[in-house]
Image: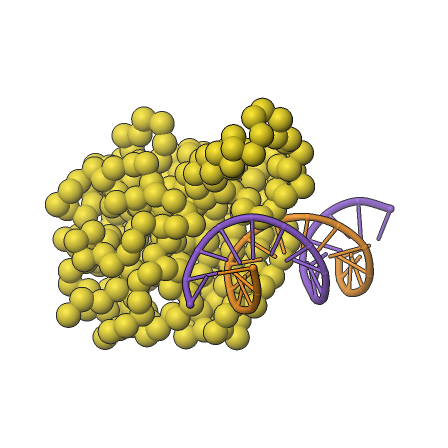
Chain colours: A yellow, B purple, C orange
Amino acid sequence: MSNEHRDFYYHTPFQEDHLDVKPPSILGSSTYNRSTPGQGLDPSSYMSLTECLHGSVDYNSLAKAFGLSPSSSEVFSSIEESSRPVEARDLDGGNSTDQVPATPNSSVSFSSSEAGGDEDSGKTKKETQPEKPEDGGENSDKKDKAKKKAEKRQKEPRFAFMTKSEVDHLEDGYRWRKYGQKAVKNSPYPRSYYRCTTQKCTVKKRVERSFQDPSIVITTYEGQHNHPIPTTLRGSASAMFSHSMLAPAPMASGPSFPQHQGYNFVQIPAAMNNQNMGAYPQNVNQHVHQQYQVPDYGLLQDIVPSIFLRQEP
DNA sequence: CGCATTTGACCGGCGC
DNA sequence: GCGCCGGTCAAATGCG
């Protein structure tokens, strides 16, 4: 794998007012509040990647993808899951002017939703089942389930982003084991499921290729690593981002990004592009515009929601 | 031989 | 209630 990463790009904070999404059903809604109401994003609340790396959210991997993806790859957008309801209509090429005050020129915004819901939806069948209902019979049992479900939905944060890459599985420094693959409805490309191989680490990620633009890989991280990056890639990755990311995110007990109704964003300031992203091209804007024209993600919309699918006249 | 991947089965959630 | 679908499990298989 060559670490031949290249550009990335742009940030697309959602403007809740126009955001045609409803509360994530699978992901649940975030418990965080937006920090800057009018402004899509508040620079002061940017979270440093370092924090991301070891902090509460596993955006590190994704962040790393920026510079560590194998072969050429470009992260040109991040998306947050849970906007299934967004329809992929009216994609006119990305004139989302309603998007944000922030200059789309060279910042990247990672968006995520806190809580992806269970970190193991179906899986733990065997692991979780062991717990027997003996407290109060059916009633309490049901309540319990509902309760658990609710709780689950608020757990693992998810973070999805798109990368232009030749390879599906981007090298992000962590070791992953593939545990499943499913065909994606309406897409010729399958979706792969990976789990961090480190013990006790429950981080998972899904990787699928856009059927609209096969060169685009959509990666969704779920959970947070509770261990350092195992590979040597870490160095470059964290180094790069610790420099790139600004602010000491004012976080109390969780990820702190500029937020939008239930979504968290990590934004990599524009500066990153110039000073710290030496390897990246300077013509970000160009890229942004080009890449932005993702016509229709169809099913991918559940993880490629607002940014590309949302269009306002 | 150990570890990673493949792949069909299974399960739960959700919409109709 | 039923069927579809996404996500996970786990046995089989492949690979270094």
Place of residue A95 in the rendered image (x, y in percent of width and height, measured from the top left):
19, 68
List x then y, in percent, for residue A261: 25, 45
Q: Is residue A132 left or right of residue A170?
A: right
Identified at 62% across, 57% down, the residue is: A180
Between A193 and A59, the one nearer to me in the picture: A193
Q: x, y (%) of residue A282? A: 28, 61
Quarter of the image where the C terminus of chain A is located? bottom left
Q: Is residue A278 visible?
A: no
Q: Is residue A42 above or below residue A273?
A: above
Q: Residue at x 42, y 34 (%)?
A: A56
Quadrant of the image occupied by residue A183: bottom right
Q: Is residue A13 left or right of residue A119?
A: left
Residue at the spot x=29%, y=60% of the render? Answer: A306
Q: Position of residue A178 (x, y in %)?
A: 63, 54
In the rendered image of this protein, does residue A9 appear above or below residue A297? above
- Quarter of the image for the N terminus of chain A: give it: bottom right
Q: Residue drawn 46% across and 64% down? A: A217
